[in-house]
Image (cartoon, rainbow, N blue to C red):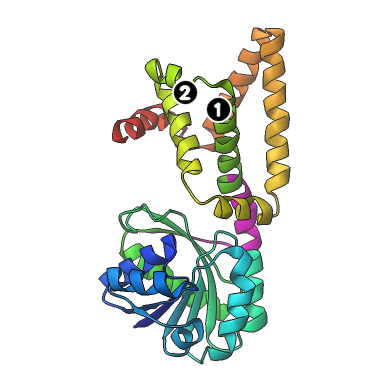
């Protein structure tokens, strides 16, 4: 299959290109910076072309561009799509991109997808993907994609674009928010070197989370915070809860602290079947670092 990856020299786009080349597909990548595009193309063995050329000559198109450029790119390639073509996006936000693809693309079948991992992954085995079909044609395509992914050891979840964005406001926005605020707090305390001498398992997990988020593209993380519709409300709730817990500590109210912690533990046991293994999982993760 001939596959075009629009934005193929970005981290995720390049990862996808390498993976698809390894699967035996003919891959063409595109990008704004012609020098960088040519360099990446040579490095991974992919063809290079303009967005419109790559779209017109491919059986499938994967759109892997920043969310701020998404509508501009879709509007550009839409006249060059054709019947029978598959057009997928891999953005971390789904409602707006899916709406944009439907607005401009009148040929082929579109499908919103979200690989739930970063370009540091070794492969798709054990990784999760979210698919967001909105009509019967997209559902049929999603079923084929699901079968392919599951045959290769990946997990697949199907939901609506709106459901996806609500969940990502928790799964991505909240976890990133916690990491960034933790990093800001640790830097403000100015004790990183001291804590490294006597750190414990939980602290190392927190520090790893904070530093891993800081090591990535700030524009990407900003786009998630600004575009996920429920991110601000979720983070406001977190801030409220953080203030309440801090107040318990300030008042030295150990009775209420213990009571709340026991209640939350009981609720997690009811709602999360994996709760019992969490403590062991933490040590397994630390052992891998």
Judging by the rendered image, the residue that carries numbered circle 2 is 192
Residue at the spot 38% in from the left edge and 65% down from the top edge: 14
Q: Which quarter shows the N terminus?
A: bottom left
Q: Which quarter shows the C terminus?
A: top left
Image quadrant of residue 58?
Answer: bottom left
What segment is highlighted magenta in the picture? Answer: 157-170
Does the segment drawn in magenta span residue 66? no
Q: Position of residue 126 (x, y in %)?
A: 35, 53
Secondary element type, mark 1? helix
Separation of disc 1 and disc 2 at Cα?
A: 7 Å
Residue extending furthest toward the bottom: 83
Q: Position of residue 234 (x, y in %)?
A: 69, 42
Judging by the rendered image, the residue that carries numbered circle 1 is 187
Q: Residues within 10 Å of mark 2 (few under 14, many from 20)?
A: few
Tag 1 near tag 2, CB within 8 Å:
yes
Say which of 181 and 259 sits in front: 181
Q: Position of residue 94 (x, y in %)?
A: 60, 64
């Amino acid at each position: 299959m001939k596959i075009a990856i629009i934005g193929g020299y970005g981290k995720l786009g390049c990862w996808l290109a390498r993976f698809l080349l390894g699967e035996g597909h003919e891959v063409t990548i595109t990008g704004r910076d012609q020098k960088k595009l040519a360099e990446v193309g040579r490095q991974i063995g992919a063809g290079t072309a303009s967005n419109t050329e790559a779209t017109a000559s491919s059986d499938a198109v994967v759109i892997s561009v920043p969310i701020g450029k998404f509508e501009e790119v879709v509007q550009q390639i839409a006249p060059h799509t054709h019947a029978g073509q598959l057009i997928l996006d891999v953005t971390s936000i789904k409602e707006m991109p899916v709406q944009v693809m439907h607005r401009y693309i009148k040929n082929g079948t579109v499908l919103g997808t979200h690989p739930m991992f970063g370009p540091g992954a070794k492969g798709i085995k054990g990784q999760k993907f979210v698919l967001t079909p909105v009509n019967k044609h997209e559902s049929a395509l999603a079923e084929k994609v699901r079968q392919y992914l599951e045959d290769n050891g990946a997990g697949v979840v199907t939901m609506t674009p709106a459901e996806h964005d609500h969940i990502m406001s928790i799964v991505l926005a909240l976890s990133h928010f916690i990491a960034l605020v933790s990093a800001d707090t640790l830097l403000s305390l100015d004790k990183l070197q001291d804590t490294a001498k006597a750190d414990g398992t939980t602290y190392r997990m927190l520090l790893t989370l904070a530093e891993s988020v800081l090591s990535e593209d700030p524009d990407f993380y900003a786009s998630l915070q600004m575009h996920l519709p429920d991110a601000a409300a979720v983070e406001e709730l977190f801030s409220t809860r953080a203030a309440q817990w801090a107040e318990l500590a300030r008042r030295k109210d150990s009775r209420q602290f213990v009571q709340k912690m026991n209640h939350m533990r009981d609720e997690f046991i009811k709602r999360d079947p994996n709760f019992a293994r969490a403590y062991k999982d933490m040590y397994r993760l630390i052992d891998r670092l």
